């Protein structure tokens, strides 16, 4: 049973516009959330994270928003660049066991 | 540091054959994780080790899968016998502590015919 869900398998966006990736989770015990980015033929790399005590975390062009009541988080990329074309994985863990649960990923394509 | 190293990068085998995937974690990292990526389920944690000791193998699909970590710089994931449904990309990751960032290897793409 997947506890972290990314319902959009793909997203296409114009260069310079905003990319919004969504993620939903079912386990209310998750207290830390992460986004990983993956290029073809490479392993995922950590991008940004947020603790459940916050509702927003920003790092340059990347901002993650957390809505705990809705069990929903999103990643905003502004402005989108061609190098952002990749697969983005949402992940979550509980601080009692720190096991990462990943979503299925969203493939982002940034059009020039 | 060279990062997490995995071998082979690609493996094609026939159903029933034994498959062994290898991983060298980042030096000094005490935690090692094995993941499997499929289109439908994304990344699934199979097993993780702390200081070479398996801590949680609840994600291992069945007895055909086994993992070992004989020393701090080497781990294997073995599938015996392999089946077509095992076809996936298998990632190894390591971290310095359980709550620290996990660094992933490039993955092994396995195809079982």
Image (cartoon, helix red, strand yellow):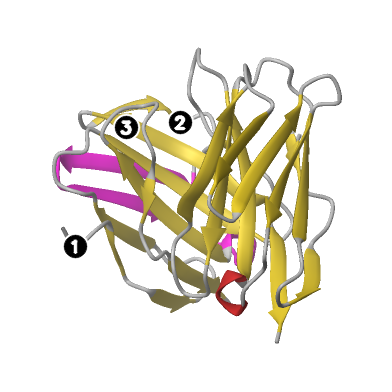
Residue B37 can be seen in this image: yes
Q: Measuring from the top left, give residue A39's x and y in whole percent.
A: 52, 70
> From mark 2 to mark 3, how far is it between C-alphas?
9 Å
Q: Which chain carries label 1?
A: B
Q: Which tag, 2 or 3, sits closer to the chain's start?
A: 3
Residue A103 appears left or right of B50: right
Q: Would you name the residue on which mark 3 appears?
A: B49
Q: Measuring from the top left, give residue B35's x and y in whole percent.
A: 48, 48
Q: In which quarter of the image is the C terminus of chain B?
A: bottom right
Q: Does the magenta stretch include residue A90?
A: no
Within the image, what quadrant is residue B80 found in? bottom left
First to last magenta residue range: B64-86
Q: Which mark is residue B2?
A: 1
Q: Mark 2 lies on which chain?
A: B
Q: Would you name the residue on which mark 2 appears?
A: B57
Q: Is residue B79 magenta?
A: yes
Q: Which residue is located at x 66 percent, y 32 percent?
A: A56
Q: Which tag, 2 or 1, sits closer to the chain's start?
A: 1
> From mark 2 to mark 1, how far is it between C-alphas?
27 Å
Residue B79 can be seen in this image: no
Q: Which residue is located at x 28 percent, y 41 percent?
A: B68
């Amino acid at each position: 049973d997947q506890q972290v869900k990314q319902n959009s398998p793909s997203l296409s966006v114009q260069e310079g516009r905003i990319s919004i990736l969504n993620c939903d989770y079912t386990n209310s015990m998750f207290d830390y959330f992460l986004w990983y980015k993956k290029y073809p033929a490479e392993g995922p790399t950590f991008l940004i994270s947020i603790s459940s005590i916050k509702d927003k975390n920003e790092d340059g062009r990347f901002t993650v928003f957390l809505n705990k009541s809705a069990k929903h988080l999103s990643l905003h990329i502004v402005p989108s660049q061609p190098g952002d074309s990749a697969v983005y994985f949402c992940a979550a863990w509980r601080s009692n066991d720190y096991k990462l649960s990943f979503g299925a990923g969203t493939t982002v394509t940034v059009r020039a | 540091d060279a990062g997490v190293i995995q071998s082979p990068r690609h493996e094609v085998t026939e159903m029933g054959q034994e498959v062994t995937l290898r991983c060298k974690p980042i030096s000094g990292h005490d935690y090692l994780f094995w993941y499997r990526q499929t289109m439908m389920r994304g990344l699934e944690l199979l097993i993780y080790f702390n200081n070479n000791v398996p801590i949680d193998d609840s994600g291992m699909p069945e007895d055909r899968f086994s993992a070992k970590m004989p020393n701090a710089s080497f781990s294997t994931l073995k599938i015996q016998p392999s089946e077509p449904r095992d076809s996936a990309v298998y990632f190894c990751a390591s971290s310095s502590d359980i709550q620290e960032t996990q660094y992933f290897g490039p993955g092994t793409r396995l195809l079982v015919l």
